[in-house]
């Protein structure tokens, strides 16, 4: 086995690796992009591919400097020559495999989340790892993907070995040192990315007002590196300065934030007074406090409801409730994953993961369950999976929940309950919830019950005894992203989850709970893998989730809500507080959907990055490169706009200010909580 010609091997890896990344870019463009991009924005696509090649060279050059150069140096001395040349070949093979494996993973990741790698990726080990792997195995062509990666890597490796036969480092011709030196300098230059004060960096990946085009720039390695950086920033809240991230939202001080929002000042006390509002006194509610149920439904997307008919029954028992109660259609999830959405809803936090590790022991004053707890409610968290998932059994007890129930409690009560990969099927979760309500009513308790379902999740399955309701998928089929068999399973699971929620509501309607139980339900995010979405044209349908409210007549306000109002998860709890609580202090990070709101407040935020309203969309609305979009006539598809409408610009400013305020207050709560914990620990040691 001969060593490799250093210069030739380096250039082969750079060129073949870049061609590989380019191939996956093209696949991403053709699979998930709007076809009009090829005709209307070909110049921007060309810039994206050019800049992408520069990022490819940067990451590949960095890998070569770290691994291949080290192996080549080992190959120079005679005593380690054999080991070095083996390492050379191993490093080439490793770099090609790592590039191709990361690229194909990001291709499928983008297909699911419609974004390059983000910190959600780390859910692979923070989540139920077995469940995640089972879902990947069920929903993706894992075997074919691995075979493609191995075949492509083998081909690249063989081409490199053929081209780079012989070794400059062992055959000292007069030109060999010069070629090696030039190659090393080229690697250093490519690893930096450009001349000038700054190396190639995140800002350089923005080449267009179209976010999808920008997503094409960063290769899988760069996106993974950025995700790791973002992850570290998200979970490192130990800085004593809670204002450290204000600049990221476009503000230099809390005073600027306060001025934008209309707060008295940027002083800590004034901002806290601005954050916390009070519901108006309501004698009827005070005398007859209702039970409140919030159901966070796994992957409950709104787009699928468009195809619900008697012949294609996607909702079952839920349909009549959606028709006669309040359903908001232009409603968006706070985050793209279950746990991030859970923290956004229950902690009003834009930072996630917040409750992993020591921060989970802090009780947050802005926690959503606190107003119910302070009003004498028994607060319960009920999860269809294991309470070990993301440590919610421990965490939620610090967030003003009296008790946390999980699948173990449900199985103990119903030994015949069937399980799925992620926990217990939804019917048993709702059955348990109904029993809790009945028992609490009998004891004269008022209950706030938060439910988190699991069934409508990959791998999509329903209980053995469930017989699907009639489905006629001919109108949905042209929109399927998945193959017919997988799509059928997804639709049946979506139907099952809807039907079980409907049966739960039926039981409430036909019981003594009917006139005194409020129910709100929404999705943690859309079921993204079922239907095809072209970015950014179909962003609305990609991110929409239903927002359903069951409000008994006695608790309904005079104001009739607008079902087409643009709103999001941040607006659910303020609505429930006003419907169910009298004279209660609550964190005001959203608006009451059952009351009028000024136009500048009628918008939705997704992943604390994208903004949607009647005026259009800002994708993103945070950062130096804001991209504005208008709606088409049907208000469903987005088209690029040269400039955002004045109202949309104002909504963007308001949203950034609220986000900056929430970021500051989350960090402030963490700092205060850690300080309290330190004082308590010192006190405990003194007492010992």
Image (cartoon, rainbow, N blue to C red):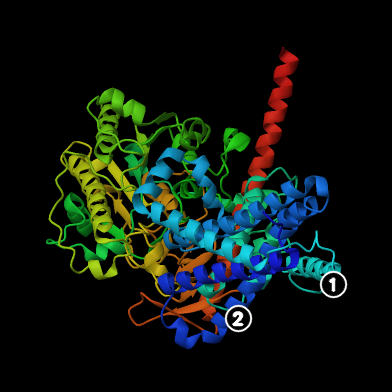
Q: Secondary structure at mark 1?
A: loop
Determine whether label 2 and label 1 are within 8 Å by CB: no
Residue at position x 57%, y 36% in the image: 360
In whole angstroms, how far apart are the C-alphas of marks 2 and 1? Answer: 36 Å
Can residue 128 be seen here? The reply is: no
**Of residues 251 and 272, the one drawn nearer to the viewer in this rendering:** 251
Residue 48 numbered tag: none
Q: Secondary structure at mark 2?
A: helix
Left or right: residue 56 versus residue 107 is right
**Is residue 681 placed above or below 362 in the rendered structure?**
above
How many labels were placed on the picture? 2
Left or right: residue 321 versus residue 134 is left
**Is residue 426 placed above or below 78 in the rendered structure?**
above
Can residue 31 be seen here? The reply is: yes
Residue at position x 55%, y 76% in the image: 627
In the rendered image, residue 438, in percent from the top left (x then y), is placed at: 25, 30
Nearest to N terminus: mark 2 or mark 1 = 2
Residue at position x 39%, y 56% in the image: 144
Which residue was labeled with disc 1?
175
Q: Residue furthest right?
A: 174
Identify the image quadrant of residue 207: bottom right
Left or right: residue 560 versus residue 52 is left
In the rendered image, residue 335, in percent from the top left (x then y), is placed at: 48, 55
Q: Residue furthest top?
A: 688
In the rendered image, residue 465, in percent from the top left (x then y), is placed at: 16, 39
Identify the image quadrant of residue 95: bottom right
**Is residue 316 placed above or below 504 in the rendered structure?**
below
In the rendered image, residue 423, in percent from the top left (x then y), is placed at: 34, 36
Left or right: residue 22 versus residue 492 is right
The C terminus, quarter of image = top right
Which residue was labeled with disc 2?
47
């Amino acid at each position: 086995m001969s060593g490799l010609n250093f210069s030739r091997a380096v250039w082969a890896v750079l060129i073949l690796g870049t061609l590989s990344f380019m191939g996956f870019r093209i696949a991403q463009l053709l699979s998930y992009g709007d076809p009009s991009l090829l005709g209307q924005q070909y110049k921007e696509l060309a810039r994206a591919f050019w800049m992408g090649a520069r990022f490819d060279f940067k990451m590949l050059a960095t890998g070569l400097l770290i691994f291949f150069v080290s192996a080549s140096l080992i190959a120079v001395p005679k005593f380690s020559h054999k080991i070095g040349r083996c390492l050379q070949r191993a490093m080439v093979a490793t770099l090609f495999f790592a590039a191709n494996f990361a690229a194909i993973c990001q291709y499928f990741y983008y297909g699911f989340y419609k974004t390059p790698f983000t910190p959600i990726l780390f859910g692979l080990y923070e989540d139920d790892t077995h469940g995640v792997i089972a879902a990947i195995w069920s929903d993706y062509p894992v075997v074919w993907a691995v075979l493609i990666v191995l075949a492509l890597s083998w081909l690249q490796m063989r081409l490199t070995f053929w081209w780079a036969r012989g070794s400059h480092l062992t055959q000292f011709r007069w030109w060999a040192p010069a070629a090696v030196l030039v190659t090393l300098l080229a690697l250093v230059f490519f690893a930096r990315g450009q001349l000038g004060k700054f190396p190639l960096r995140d800002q350089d990946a923005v080449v267009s007002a179209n976010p999808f085009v920008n997503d094409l720039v960063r290769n899988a390695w760069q996106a993974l590196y950025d995700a790791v950086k973002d992850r570290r920033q998200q979970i490192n809240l130990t800085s004593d300065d809670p204002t450290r991230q204000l600049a990221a939202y476009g503000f230099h001080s809390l005073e600027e934030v306060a001025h934008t929002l209309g707060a008295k000042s940027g002083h800590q006390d004034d901002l806290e007074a601005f954050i916390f509002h009070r519901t108006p006194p309501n004698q009827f509610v005070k005398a007859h406090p209702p039970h409140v149920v919030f159901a966070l439904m796994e992957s409950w997307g709104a787009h699928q409801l468009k195809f619900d008919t008697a012949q294609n029954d996607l909702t079952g028992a839920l349909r009549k409730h959606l028709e006669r109660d309040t359903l908001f259609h232009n409603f968006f999830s706070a985050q793209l994953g279950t746990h991030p959405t859970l923290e956004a809803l229950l902690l009003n936090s834009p930072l996630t993961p917040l409750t992993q590790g020591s921060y989970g022991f802090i009780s947050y004053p802005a926690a959503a369950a606190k107003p119910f707890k302070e009003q004498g409610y028994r607060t319960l968290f009920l999860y269809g999976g294991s309470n070990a998932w993301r440590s919610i059994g421990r965490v939620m007890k610090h967030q003003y929940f009296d008790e946390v129930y999980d699948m173990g409690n449900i199985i103990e009560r119903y030994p015949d309950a069937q399980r799925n990969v992620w926990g217990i099927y939804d019917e048993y979760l709702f059955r348990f919830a109904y029993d809790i309500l009945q028992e609490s009513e009998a004891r004269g308790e008022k209950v706030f019950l938060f439910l988190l379902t699991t069934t409508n999740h990959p791998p999509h399955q329903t209980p053995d005894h469930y017989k699907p309701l009639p489905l006629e998928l001919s109108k949905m089929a042209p929109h399927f992203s998945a193959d017919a068999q997988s799509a059928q399973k997804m639709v049946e699971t979506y139907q099952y989850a809807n039907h079980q929620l409907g049966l739960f509501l039926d039981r409430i309607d036909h019981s003594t709970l009917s006139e005194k139980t409020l129910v709100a339900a929404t999705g943690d995010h859309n079921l993204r893998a079922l239907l095809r979405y072209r970015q950014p044209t179909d962003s609305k349908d990609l991110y929409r989730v239903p927002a359903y409210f069951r409000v008994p007549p006695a608790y309904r306000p005079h104001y009739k809500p607008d079902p087409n109002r643009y709103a999001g998860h941040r607006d659910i709890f303020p609505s429930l507080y006003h419907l169910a609580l009298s004279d209660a202090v609550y964190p005001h990070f959203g608006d009451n959907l059952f009351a009028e709101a000024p136009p500048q407040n009628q918008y939705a935020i997704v992943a604390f990055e994208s903004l949607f309203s009647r005026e259009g969309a800002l994708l993103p609305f945070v950062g130096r490169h804001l991209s504005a979009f208008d709606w088409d006539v049907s208000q469903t598809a987005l088209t690029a706009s040269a400039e955002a409408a004045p109202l949309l610009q104002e909504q963007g400013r308001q949203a950034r200010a609220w986000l900056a305020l929430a970021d500051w207050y989350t960090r402030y709560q963490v700092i205060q909580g850690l300080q309290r914990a330190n004082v308590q620990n010192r006190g405990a040691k003194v007492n010992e």
